[in-house]
Image (cartoon, helix red, strand yellow):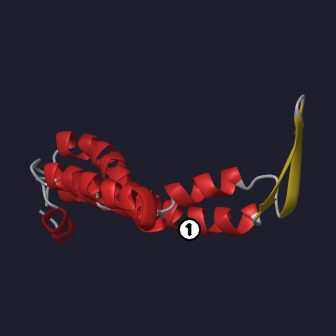
Amino acid sequence: MNGLGTAVGGTGTRQDQDRGWGFFAAWAVVGGGCALAVLTLLSIGIFVLPVAALVALLLTRFSGWQRGLPGLVSGLGVPLLYVAYLNRGGPGTVCTTSGTGQTCTDEWNPWLWLVGALIPLVVGVVAMVVVRRQERRGVRSGA
């Protein structure tokens, strides 16, 4: 077994490799929950953080759970991606008109939020791809 397979847990078998993206998605949920908890600490954050911690604890009960840890990094970008979406009309004052009146709101620059979201998303996916490629090399070589 190569050093990477040992570091990330599991045996490096085909079944472990197939479960890798599932663990990635689950850890992304944990990362997104943690980021959401920090961003909304004074409102719902105190309720979101225990749920994210519970999901993380449950994930550690499965063999090979470490394999998807790069998803934790990617998950940090998900709430930021949502903020970018909410500010898609910005930057500046955005007014919407309905049949009963007009509402104006100030929106931030969505591109800054989008860049802030894409950096952890891409870093996590790239890290996961690198880990999986190194695991495949270890399985093929029989190490």
Residue 16 in view of the camera: yes
Q: Nearer the viewer, residue 95 or 35?
A: 95
- Estimate the x, y position of residue 30 in percent, counting from the top left: 32, 55
**Residue under numbered circle 1:** 119
Q: Is residue 12 visible?
A: no
**Residue 111: horizontal and vertical position, in percent?**
74, 64
Vertical side of 88 occupied by 106: above or below:
below
Residue 90 in the image, given as x and y percentages of width and height: 82, 59
Left or right of 60 on screen, residue 92: right
Q: Residue at 32% across / 54% down in the picture?
A: 47
Image quarter of the N terminus: bottom left
Furthest toward the front, the residue is 100
Q: Is residue 109 above or below residue 97?
A: below
Query: Is residue 52 shown left or right of residue 80?
Result: left
In front of the other: 121 or 79: 79
Q: Position of residue 68 (x, y in %)?
A: 29, 55
Viewer-proximal residue among 112 and 107: 107
79 on left or right of 132: right
Which residue type carries mark 1?
Ile
Number of marks in the image? 1
Which residue occupies 26% across, 51% down? Answer: 51
From what the image shows, is residue 106 above or below residue 54? below
Would residue 93 appear left or right of 30 to someone viewing this image?
right
Give the residue at x 19% y 45%: 16
